[in-house]
Image: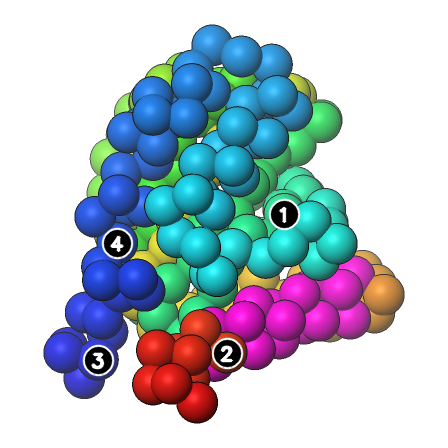
Amino acid sequence: MTLWLGRGFKGGPAGLASCQGLMVTSGATGLDHELAFSKIIVELRKKHPGHILPDEDLQWVFVNTGRWMGSMCLLHASLTEYVLLFGTAVDTGGHSGRYWADISNTIISGTFQQWKEGTTRSEIYYPGDTIVHQAGEATSVQWSAGTWMVEYGRGFIPSTLAFALADTLFSTQDFVTLFYTLRVYTKSLLLEANAFFSTLGC
């Protein structure tokens, strides 16, 4: 199990896991978030050809979970890794979720306030900071309006879907968003399957 979860796409996640390094190499640091996103996508496609969704499959999709609301644009996903753009245009906050995956967020704009379980004080993070949410951890999170970031997850990714989709299923009942979410994840899995079989010469 550990060996399987330790597998990364395209020879490992070393460049991808370091979102700070990605922002530097892409020239995204200090830019408007939309321009930064464009540069990050270009850099990822350069480093990981065949593993990043094409432009026609990129879509901003609402995320309602843990009593907060944001929006994500999935760039890559497999059974063990994902990378996406995430943020919110309004103030929002709630429960982080507790996952079988390590998740890191590198802030491009805005602020990310986090209150860790077992502590009595919160911390505020700013553009350029990277926040690491270890597998099994739970925190209270709050984002100011205009907070945008790059998110990288590594672990058993399907296990994160239960929390990610819970509010959509049992609260908002926004089944259009549910469809969009499952569709883009399926497209990412198919892209990864195609890349895998290509390496086998199939």
Q: How many residues crowd mark 3 within 10 Å: few (<14), some (14–19), many (20+)?
A: few
Q: Residue furthest bottom?
A: 202
Q: Which residue is drawn at 41% across and 26% down?
A: 26
Q: Is residue 16 left or right of residue 46?
A: left
**Residue 84 percent location from the top left of the image:** 52, 48
Look at the image and name its color scheme.
Answer: rainbow
Q: What residue type is labelled 1?
A: Cys
Q: Give the range drawn in magenta.
A: 177-193
- The residue beneath circle 4 is 13
The answer to which of marks 3 and 1 sits earlier in the sequence is 3
The amino acid at mark 2 is Asn
Q: What element carries label 3?
A: helix
Residue 73: give its label.
1
Magenta-colored stretch includes residue 82: no
Q: Quadrant of the C terminus?
A: bottom left
3D distance between C-alphas at marks 2 and 1: 21 Å
Location of residue 13 (image quadrant): bottom left
Mark 4 or 2, nearer chain start:
4
Label 4 secondary element: loop
Q: Give the Cα distance between marks 3 and 4.
A: 14 Å
> Which of the labelled discs sits on residue 52, or is there none?
none
Give the side of residue 33 with respect to residue 119, left or right: right
Dot label at residue 4: 3
User: Mark 2 or mark 3: which comes first in sequence?
Assistant: 3
Q: Splitting the image into 4 quarters, where does residue 197 fall?
A: bottom left
Provide the residue designation for mark 2: 194
